[in-house]
Image (tube, rainbow, N blue to C red):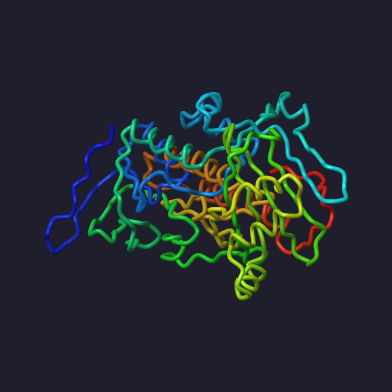
Amino acid sequence: MARAIREPSGSSGPVLLRYDAAVVGGGVAGLAAAIHLRRADLRVVCLEPEPFPHERVGESLDWSSPDLLAGIGLPCEGLIAESVSTFKRNIKVVSPGRPVSVGEPPKWWSAPPLRFEQVTLHVDRPEMDSRLFARALDLGVEFLWDRGREVVIEGERVVAVETVGGRRIEASWFVDASGRNARLFARRFDIRRHDYGRDKVSLWGYFDTPCENEGTTFYIEEPKIAYLSWVWEIPINPGRTSVGCVMEAAAVREQRRRGRTIDDILRDRLAPFPRFQPLLAESSRLAVRSTAYRCFVHANACGPNWLMMGEAASFPDALTGNGVTTALRHASEGAQLILQALDRGSLTGRQRRVYNANLRRMGRLFNQATADRPVVDSRLDGMVE
């Protein structure tokens, strides 16, 4: 189990804490990285300001996720058995006046040499994140419920992170998984980022309804404006479904100026589709969540003894990419690089180039597909999350 953490005393200076590896942020990327590093017997601390469970969007995983989850001790069979997940067997696209399109991974994906999964998962994020947290605790990861305030550097190396609560965390290795809003290391090193597309807003809520399709369903109206807006339906457990929409932020702001609530806006987006009409009629008011974002990729995501992971490093477009799978992949690849470099105490130039190349390639691949190109073919031929 995790060791107890000393609280700051009344001394004038910060409380000094020393670890092999310090992870800033307890989201998917941070927890997964902490698990990988702790399994290698490093003394690991995770700095996280928000208690669990976290409520996050990002519930439809791509086809590489089962192996990545199994690699940190969360096999998909267990998540299904505990009703934390449902199977995702396809992607279905529904658009008024057009035939329904259903896409499934081709059978050759599972054959050598690829051996890709043909079935992946939808997940109940608070439940999955809580299991990641419990897994980290069981392995002995220490948690500090505090927020990073300053990154202390010497040249290109990070030597410490100082917190709002008066702690100074020193470590041999650092992982920045602080999220897209904080991006502690990117700000400290003044790392350039490349933005994609426009500012967007996601609005979503949940309906207690049985699973209708063992897959992620997208609902798309014929565009009345040049920029694509779309609705998702994701069965996160056998009796509960996530439903939401993605819109251009400017369109949301305009409707808010006209007095529309986010509940009104989401209802308006769902109303044209027969699937949602009885669900809306049964719910006089939705508990609508919202988040604003813009997709991006950083020009650099690592240094001699630090790496950026998850949304601190890049933010993939939700239509073509998957933030959860991206975070798991960053954690797996980044932790492996750290473990390979333990004796040296620094990542080699080649390791840094490989990590950055992989991160930028995936970020550009997912983001360029939907950055500013209007999508008028509602079948979205060939789209795989």
- Residue 213, image x and y in percent? 71, 35
- Residue 223, image x and y in percent? 80, 61
Looking at the image, residue 363 lies above or below residue 4:
below
- Which of the 4 image quarters holds residue 249? bottom right
How many marks the image carries: the answer is 0
- Residue 335, image x and y in percent? 45, 40
Comparing 108 with 190, the one in front is 108
Rendered residue at 66%/49% (across/down):
281
Comparing 255 with 202, the one in front is 255
Looking at the image, residue 47 lies above or below residue 89:
below
Whether residue 322 is visible here, answered yes or no, is yes
State the quadrant of the C terminus.
Answer: top right
Rendered residue at 55%/24% (across/down):
77
- Residue 210, image x and y in percent? 63, 34
Q: Residue furthest left?
A: 11
- Which of the 4 image quarters holds residue 285? bottom right
Rendered residue at 35%/53% (across/down):
49
